[in-house]
Amino acid sequence: MTDTLSPLGTPWRTFEDLVVGETRVSPTRTVTEAEIVEFARAHDPQWFHTDPEAARASVFGQVVASGIHVLAIWRQMDHAINGDIDFVCGVGWDRLRLKRAVRADALIAGADFQKQLRLPPKLFVAGTRFGSWILRRTGGHAHMQLRGAKPFAHSRILTAAQ
């Protein structure tokens, strides 16, 4: 960390600033058909992601975002929610469920719930357990559910350990 403010324009938060039970929700975002098709053509070129006309004959009845696209969207939303945490993060996922297709023009938001904080015996590594969701803003149905651990080390602990 070299700047006094995070990319969110707020002061950096450290491990000690995180609170069990804290829930954060990202701004909403509309996933367009053009975005779905463009991403799929580059990264997951299955016909029901890339061809709107052919996708009408699929079980979805239209193009839907690929799972990889949904995870990329989640990552952007996670940064919008947690971009003020001073950590070096390697996300470990215990369980991932893509529960519903993300369809064109879906209005979605990301949510993150802090379940557990722990400082294991290693001085410079701390960890959190979290739950994350991508939610459809109308009706609140989960498109994606992710539970796991975020092991991280923030700069103050790293500095003290070095």
Image (tube, rainbow, N blue to C red):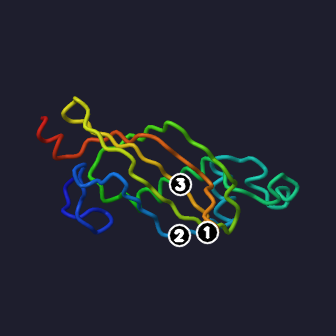
Left or right of residue 18, residue 92 in this image: right
Left or right of residue 131, residue 106 in this image: right
Q: Can you identify the residue that label 3 sits on?
A: 133
Instruction: Check disc 3 and give the amino acid type.
Output: Trp
Residue 35: give x, y in percent of width and height. 64, 63
Q: In the figure, residue 117 lies in which quadrant?
A: top left
Residue 45: give x, y in percent of width and height. 71, 47
Q: Are marks 1 and 2 in contact (CB under 8 Å)?
A: yes
Instruction: Check disc 1 and give the amino acid type.
Output: Leu
Q: Can you identify the residue that label 2 sits on?
A: 28
Residue at 64% x, 67% y is 139
Residue at 53% x, 54% y is 133
Left or right of residue 146, residue 126 in this image: left
Residue at 25% x, 49% y is 15
Q: Using the numbered discs, state the Cα–Cα distance from disc 3 to disc 1 in whole angstroms.
A: 14 Å
Helix, strand or loop under label 1:
strand
Crowd tier of the residue under label 2, counting other residues whose Cα lies within 10 Å: few below 14, some 14–19, many 20 or above = some
Q: Using the numbered discs, state the Cα–Cα distance from disc 3 to disc 2 in whole angstroms.
A: 13 Å
Most foreground residue, 106 or 129: 129
Instruction: Check disc 2 and give the amino acid type.
Output: Thr
- Mark drawn on residue 107: 1
Most foreground residue, 120 or 64: 120
Residue 13: give x, y in percent of width and height. 25, 57
The single residue placed furthest to the top in the displayed view is 121
The single residue placed furthest to the right in the displayed view is 57
Left or right of residue 154, residue 90 in this image: right
Helix, strand or loop under label 3:
strand
Q: In the figure, residue 21 lies in which quadrant?
A: bottom left
Q: Quadrant of the C terminus?
A: top left
The tag earlier along the polypeptide, 3 or 1, is 1
Say which of marks 3 and 2 sits in front. Answer: 3
Residue 54: give x, y in percent of width and height. 85, 56
